[in-house]
Image (cartoon, rainbow, N blue to C red):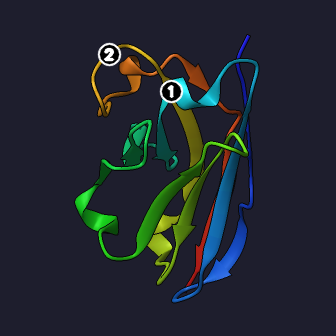
């Protein structure tokens, strides 16, 4: 069984930064494409960023382009989300997800097989 554990969430001021980490255990990490999702109260879960198995391909939703960076370290079985210039609208629970269903990147939640428990990010104005 694959397990994903997020860390690094918390409270930040607008304009500040946080780095989320997601440690993956249970199977070979490098076979999975990874994604970071977020869900604010009363909204649907949305894909924030995704990264392919070898880090050569990434995707960002428009609202975080230029502010967030997704990366992975296959030697440490970990994927990261560096968040800068945080805004109150970034407040949400952030989830990492792993998928291995063919293709390079996955853009929908149903394409991912495994999920972490989520970590809260709160940005104050």
Q: How many marks are shown on the rendered structure?
A: 2
Q: Is residue 107 left or right of residue 28?
A: left
Residue 11 sits in quarter: bottom right
Residue at 67%, 32% (x, y): give it: 116
> Which residue occupies the foreground of this view, 91 or 96?
96
At x 27%, y 23%, the residue is 103
Residue 28 on image: x %, y % = 65, 22
- Residue 100 at x, y percent in the picture: 45, 17
Quadrant placement of the N terminus: top right
Label whose residue precedes the other's in the sequence (2 or 1): 1
Q: Which mark is residue 102?
A: 2
Q: Can you say which quadrant of the picture contains the C terminus?
A: bottom right
Return the x and y of residue 8 as percentages of the image width and height: 74, 61
Say which of 80 and 95 sits in front.
Answer: 80
- Asked which secondary structure carries label 2, the reply is loop
Q: Position of residue 29 (x, y in %)?
A: 62, 29
Asked if disc 2 and disc 1 are in contact, CB closer than 8 Å, the reply is no
97 relative to 54, above or below: above
Q: Is 19 located above or below residue 53 in the figure?
A: below
Task: Report which quarter residue 66 is drawn in.
Answer: bottom left
Displayed quadrant of residue 101: top left
- 35 lies left or right of 119: left
Residue at the (51%, 16%) spot, across then down: 113
Q: Residue beneath label 1, please?
A: 32
SS for dot 1: loop
Q: Residues within 10 Å of mark 2 (few under 14, many from 20)?
A: few
In-front residue for pair 55/125: 55
The alpha-carbon separation of the residues under discs 2 and 1 comes to: 10 Å
Q: Residue at x 69, y 18 (%)?
A: 27
């Amino acid at each position: 069984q694959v397990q994903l554990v997020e860390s690094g969430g918390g409270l930040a001021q607008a304009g500040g930064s946080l780095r989320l980490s997601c440690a993956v255990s249970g199977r070979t990490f490098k076979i999975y494409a990874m994604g970071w999702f977020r869900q604010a109260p009363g909204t649907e879960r949305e894909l924030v960023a995704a990264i392919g198995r070898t880090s050569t391909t990434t995707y960002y939703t428009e609202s975080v382009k230029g502010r967030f960076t997704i990366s992975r370290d296959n030697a440490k079985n970990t994927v990261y989300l560096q968040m800068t210039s945080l805004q109150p609208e970034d407040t949400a629970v952030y989830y990492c997800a792993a998928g291995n269903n063919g293709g390079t990147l996955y853009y929908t939640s149903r394409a991912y097989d495994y999920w972490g428990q989520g970590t809260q990010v709160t940005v104050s104005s």
